[in-house]
Image (spheres, helix red, strand yellow):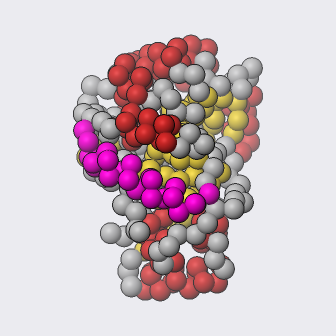
């Protein structure tokens, strides 16, 4: 079965081998972040809707699990903002009722945590990974380019309210863009807000794959370390890429389909694809070369290597 709403398992820098659940079409989001690896937002919205039938998504997850595929996490993420899907709460409860052995994670840009009903819907998940890239409105608009009338103060209050009812782990991600949100004034604001949000961990992130805007540069390891030190005594970690070993099984689709399924959602290096597919590097490189000749992939050189991006 070729899955329409699932992708991976893919190696995640934080969650091991993660089965992704993509709840919205590309690229529906409430923000158009300059660093987004999924590309520019084509539909900037804040209204929730049932983009795909909730029952169809549950059916795909059931089929995947019945194939005895081993994953570390089932993660709601993908090419847009997952909390925009109005059925996310039903899907979470379906998984917790029928497959309690699997841990659930949610990656969110935090914009809809302002809604009490959403905070209740996501309460059963194990790990919440919300993002907060600014504490002042002007920096928020520069980095995240939100839908009209979205205020960073409301988002921060939504995060604080979430912590009050959420019993799982909260890993608050801060994406650092050199020259924009790494100055002392903004960092001091972050530190004040961290006390109120009370996340279990603050995760500092920087550019690892090609972003939406080419001017966005990676933050140096040295600077990330300095910022982490500034945020002590909070539990702070710097996210670093590592190879993920897993006993996960292979997809039933062809190697080419697996590669397309992966890189159409986020750019990958050949090394990344070797980890995902568990196939020899030579085979991966040959197929990527053929796909480049036929015009179905583009390449982009970054510090970590040559990234491949799928062209629809």
Q: Is residue 29 left or right of residue 279?
A: left
Q: Is residue 196 left or right of residue 51?
A: right
Residue 27 within the segment the image draws in magenta: no
Q: Find residue 94 and report its horizontal and vertical position in percent.
A: 43, 39
Residue shown at 43% from the left, 86% from the top: 293
Q: How many numbered discs sit on the rendered protein?
A: 0
- Look at the image and say whether residue 62 sits in the magenta stretch: yes
Seen from the viewer's position, the closer of residues 192 and 215 is 192
Dividing the picture into quadrants, the one containing residue 45 is: top left
Q: Please provide the residue range marked out in magenta.
A: 49-70
The N terminus lies in quadrant: bottom left
Above or below residue 102? Residue 68 is below
Side of 266 relative to 204 (left or right) = left
What residue do we see at 64% from left, 66% from top?
275
Quarter holding the C terminus is bottom left
The answer to whether residue 27 shows anywhere in this view is: no
What x and y, as percent, mark residue 151? 35, 22
Q: Residue placed at 69% from the left, 62% from the top?
A: 247
Residue 161 in the image, given as x and y percentages of width and height = 47, 15
């Amino acid at each position: 079965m070729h899955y329409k709403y699932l992708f991976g398992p893919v190696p995640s820098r934080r969650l091991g081998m993660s089965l992704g659940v993509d709840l919205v079409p590309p690229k529906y989001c409430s923000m158009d972040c300059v660093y987004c690896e999924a590309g520019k937002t084509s539909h900037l919205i804040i209204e929730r809707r049932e983009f795909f039938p909730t029952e169809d998504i549950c059916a795909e997850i059931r089929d995947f699990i019945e194939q005895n595929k081993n994953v570390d996490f089932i993660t709601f993420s993908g090419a847009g903002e997952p909390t925009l899907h109005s059925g996310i709460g039903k899907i979470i409860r379906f998984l917790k009722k029928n497959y309690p052995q699997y841990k659930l994670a949610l990656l969110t840009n935090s914009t809809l945590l302002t809604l009490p009903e959403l905070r209740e819907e996501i309460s059963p998940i194990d790990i919440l990974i919300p993002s907060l890239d600014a504490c002042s409105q002007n920096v928020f608009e520069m980095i995240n380019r939100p839908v009209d009338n979205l205020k960073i103060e409301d988002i921060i209050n939504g995060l604080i309210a979430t912590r009050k009812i959420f019993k799982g782990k909260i890993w608050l991600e801060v994406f650092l863009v050199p020259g924009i949100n790494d100055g002392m004034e903004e960092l001091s604001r972050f530190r004040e807000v961290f006390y109120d949000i009370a996340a279990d961990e603050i995760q500092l992130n920087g550019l690892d794959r090609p972003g939406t805007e080419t001017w966005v540069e990676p933050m140096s390891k040295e600077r990330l370390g300095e910022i982490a030190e500034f945020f002590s005594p909070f539990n702070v970690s710097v996210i670093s890429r590592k190879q993920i070993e897993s006993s996960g099984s292979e997809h039933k689709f062809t190697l080419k389909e697996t590669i397309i399924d992966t890189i159409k959602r986020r750019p990958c290096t050949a090394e990344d694809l070797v980890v995902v597919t568990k196939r020899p590097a030579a085979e991966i490189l040959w197929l990527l070369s053929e796909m480049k000749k036929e015009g179905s992939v583009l390449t982009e050189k970054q510090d970590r290597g040559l990234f491949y991006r799928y062209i629809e």
